[in-house]
Each structure stands twice: as C-alpha cells, then as structure tokens.
Image (cartoon, helix red, strand yellow):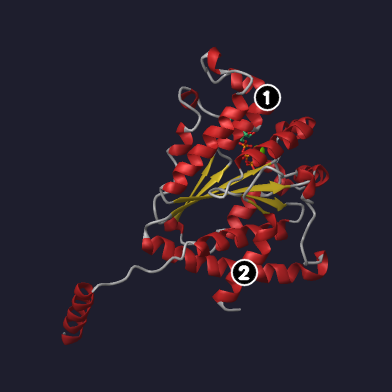
Amino acid sequence: MKTKEIIKRAGELARPFRISKGKDFRLKDVDPNDTLEFTKEADKPRAKEVLTMGVKALAELQDKLYAQDKWAMLLIFQAMDAAGKDGAIKHVMSGVNPQGCQVYSFKSPSAEDLDHDYLWRCMKYLPNRGQIGIFNRSYYEEVLVVRVHPEFLAKQKLPPTLVGKNIWEERFEDIRNFEQYLARNGVVVRKFFLHVSRKEQKRRFLDRIDDPLKNWKFSSNDAAERDFWDDYMQAYEQMIQETATKAAPWYVVPADNKWFTRVVVAAAVIETLDSLDLTYPEVDQGKLNELAAAKKKLLSK
Ligand code: ATP
Ligand code: MG
C-alpha cells in the first residue's frame, strides 16, 4: 500500500473513535470488545500487517515533523490498569526516531509536585517543536484518581476556600483552556482513553499472577482499585464529556483486544500528523549554491 492509501485507511479506522464534542458522549456507546470489520481470529494477522504499514507511515511523517520544527505533538494516554497503555506506546512508536520522541510517565505526585499547582509538573515535560511527546498518565489524573479518592485532594495543600463543590467543573475548565492555549502555540494535543472491560482486566490480572515473567507487572493495589470501577467509569465519562474539544479531541479506543487498540492508536496519530500538512523545509537559492559549491569541492579531490 502507498503512503497515501495508508493515510486514507488511517482516517477510516480512527474516525469512529474520535470525540471532538463531548456533550452527548456516553461511555456505554463504546464496546471495549469492538474490532470494527476485523473478525477476531481470522483477521488478526491482517491487523498486524496494517499496524506494520502504519508504523512505517508514521515514521515518515515524524521525520517531516522533526525537519520542519514548527509543530509539536502531545499524545496523552489514560486508562484503567492493564488496559495496555505501555504496549500501545511501545508498538505504535516502534518505528519513530528516538531523537524525535519523548515519553514521560506520571506517578503519584512528589512532595515538590504537591508544593505547586497541578499542571506544573506536566508543563515541565511538554514536547519541543518538532517532537512527539507522550504522557503515560497526565494531569487528567486530577479529575480521575483524585476525584475517586478525595484523600488525594486533601493532600494537595490547597487553600480551603478554593475547594468548593464546583472544583471538578473548575478543573475541566482550566484543562480546556490549557489545551486551547497549547493548540494556539502549535502543540497538537490528542488524548487516548483505552477502554478495557472489567472482565478483561480481571483476566489480565490473573495472567500477571500466573505467569512468572509477568509477576513484576502486578500490584495488589491495582486489583484493589477494581472496587471503585463504577466511580472511575463515571469520572472517565464526565471527563470526556467536559474536555473533548475540536482543539484537543479524545479517542475512546476499545481495549479488550490489544492488536486492535494498537491499530486504532497508530491510525489516530497518522491521521493527526497528516492533518498538519507537513513538508520538508524548502531550500533557498543561497543554500542550493552552497550545496553545489560543496559538491564541486568534494569531487575535485
Ligand atoms: P504500570 O503499567 O507500570 O502499572 P502505571 O501508570 O499504572 O504503570 P504505577 O506506578 O503503577 O504506574 O501507578 C501510578 C499511580 O500514580 C497510579 O495509580 C495513578 O493513579 C497515580 N497517580 C498519577 N497521578 C496522580 C495524581 N496526580 N494524584 C494521585 N495519584 C496519581
Ligand atoms: Mg500501575
């Protein structure tokens, strides 16, 4: 397939999952087990082929992004544990030049982080122009885990008069404004919620317990969070309703089949890079003269 066809295909694969206007979004409308027209066992190899082609196309686009040095792209990944964030990041970015890519994983905030506003620690890791930045978790934890567990909010040392009943709406507003600000500065923000079902998460946790090579990935705290599943789903749904915008859309990606998740994420990244109309910098006459002179000199010895 030619790059142009791959880009067209990417649009078709990503579009069903893109939410640019959150108002009417309902999580129940996205089936975590959805695989579009790929039937599970028969088409898995075909999906892997599509991913391989996608990774190649993505690498070409990234090369231009880097050379042009105007846009930056920020990809944000949010999900319940074991939904496949790490694997999606690893596979989708496997073809890109490491010099043009930076990944940052946000864990529980440190004492220094808590001494600042919550965007502070994320701002430090925003991608440079020409780069793809990846946030594995992000400031969205501030309306997810912090909302589900109010004790985290209590630790944030906020002046009590600022913690009112509208705190989540205020955070949504601030996040929308922040992302609008980034968009206006050439930082293209795309957000991914990898939507895994509770049943599939259980299967993956059991697998992590049973397979010695995966034991390191299991934390009993992750399993304990399952008790709060419904609270998380509510928080995710509202987060998407409130922060899916044209400037910074969410992709709600079915995540019960890892191979499919990766195809959709790659497609969304390709679709986005393509929308930027990236080109290699044009070389002016002075530079062409310089190249010709250098060539002449190299050939003369
Ligand atoms: P892994 O796949 O390795 O488990 P992970 O992203 O789950 O990756 P962990 O170190 O297991 O990494 O978990 C990070 C934890 O930090 C998560 O439970 C997350 O909810 C929590 N966290 C992230 N940001 C915040 C925040 N702002 N406030 C409180 N907790 C946070
Ligand atoms: Mg974890």
Whether residue 291 is visible to the viewer of this picture, yes or no, is: yes
Which image quarter is the N terminus in?
A: bottom right
Q: Residue at the spot x=81%, y=64% of the render?
A: 40
Q: Amino acid at mark 2?
A: Thr
Q: Residue at the spot x=60%, y=34% of the render?
A: 141
Tell me if 12 is positioned left or right of 172 in this view. Answer: right
C-alpha separation, residue under disc 1 versus residue under disc 2: 40 Å
Looking at the image, residue 53 lies above or below residue 73: below
Q: Nearer the viewer, residue 283 or 25?
A: 25
What residue is shown with label 2? 52
Q: Nearer the viewer, residue 23 or 31?
A: 23
Which image quarter is the C terminus in?
A: bottom left
Expressed as whole percent of the image width and height from the top left, the position of residue 178 reads: 48, 38
Expressed as whole percent of the image width and height from the top left, the position of residue 48 reads: 69, 67
Looking at the image, residue 284 lies above or below residue 36: below
Expressed as whole percent of the image width and height from the top left, the position of residue 139 reads: 55, 36
Q: Amino acid at mark 1?
A: His
Tag 2 secondary structure: helix
Beta carbon at label 1 within 8 Å of ligand 1:
yes
Mark 1 or 2, nearer chain start: 2
What residue is shown with label 1? 149
Q: Residue at the spot x=28%, y=72% of the render?
A: 283
